[in-house]
Structure formats: structure tokens, C-alpha cells
Image (cartoon, helix red, strand yellow):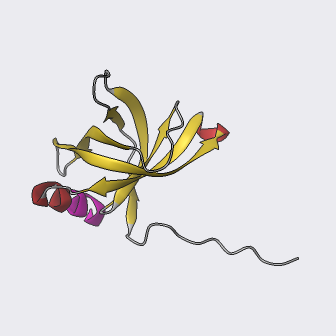
Amino acid sequence: MAEQQVTEKRGAERKSLRVLAFLVFPGMAPIPVRTIDISVNGMCIVASANPPPNVQCGFQLNLPKKPSGAFALSGRVRVIDSVLARHDDGFRISLQFLNLSTQAAAEVAQYIKG
């Protein structure tokens, strides 16, 4: 049997991030989602809805800071892909950050560094 090779879609280092986040679409109430991990390029979330690829929206979450506190991270993302993940009780969605502010990008990098 041939060995299946898995290609990593996100080249940047990622770190586990398990917090409540919100996706924000124009004219709608923010949609609560759960984060799985984050990198300087994007994040993975779990949501009850299955958005199509390339859809763009806003996001909001509180990124934990050491030794205490949080940074209010927000910006725009684009859906890269989405797959049903029954073990996560929803759709696992890969999001790409779009034009994060310099400060937001620095906070994400610091979080990943630990």
C-alpha cells in the first residue's frame, strides 16, 4: 500500500489557542466560534456553519498575554477551506489573516513564541 503524504497548507509555526472568537459579517450579529490554533498567517476555528472558500469577514477574539491579561485581536480573514469534523462537533475552518495591523501581528508572534 502506498504511503499517503500530507501537505501542510500553512507554512508558519502555529500554536494551540482555545478561546471563544466571533466572526463578523455586515448586517448580522457576530457569530460565536471556537479557535483551535493560530499562526502569524491565520487561524483554525470550529463553527456550526460551513462557509464557502474565499468568503471574507471580520473577526474578534481575546488573545491571552503573559503573565496575565489579553490583547483584543480583530481584523479581517478569508476562508481557505472547511471540512466537517464530527469529533469537533462542527466544521473545522482554515482562515487567512488579511492585512493585520503591525501591533496585532506582533501580538500574535509574541503569543506563538510563548
Q: Is residue 13 magenta?
A: no
Asked which quadrant contains residue 29, the reply is: top left
The residue nearer to you, when weighing 109 against 96, is 96
Name the image quarter holding the C terminus: bottom left
What is the x, y in percent for residue 25? 32, 31
Q: At which x and y percent is residue 70?
A: 18, 42
Q: Is residue 103 left or right of residue 1?
A: left
Point out the stretch of residues depicted in magenta: 108-114
Q: Residue at x 58, y 72 (%)?
A: 7
Residue 19 in the image, given as x and y percentages of width and height = 36, 39
Q: Residue 16, how many percent across, how many down?
A: 41, 53
Q: Residue 96, relative to residue 60: is it above or below?
A: below
Number of numbered discs overlaid on the protein picture: 0
Residue at the bottom extreme, as displayed: 2
Q: Residue furthest right?
A: 1
Image-based side of 13 in relation to 47, left or right: left
Q: Residue at x 78, y 77 (%)?
A: 3
Which residue does the image show at 16% across and 54% down from the upper left? Answer: 104
Extreme residue in the left direction: 103
Q: Identify the image quadrant of the N terminus.
A: bottom right
- Residue at position x 37%, y 50% from top? 78
Asked whether residue 38 is in view, the answer is no
Q: Is residue 108 above or below residue 8?
A: above
Q: Main secondary structure of the magenta part?
A: helix
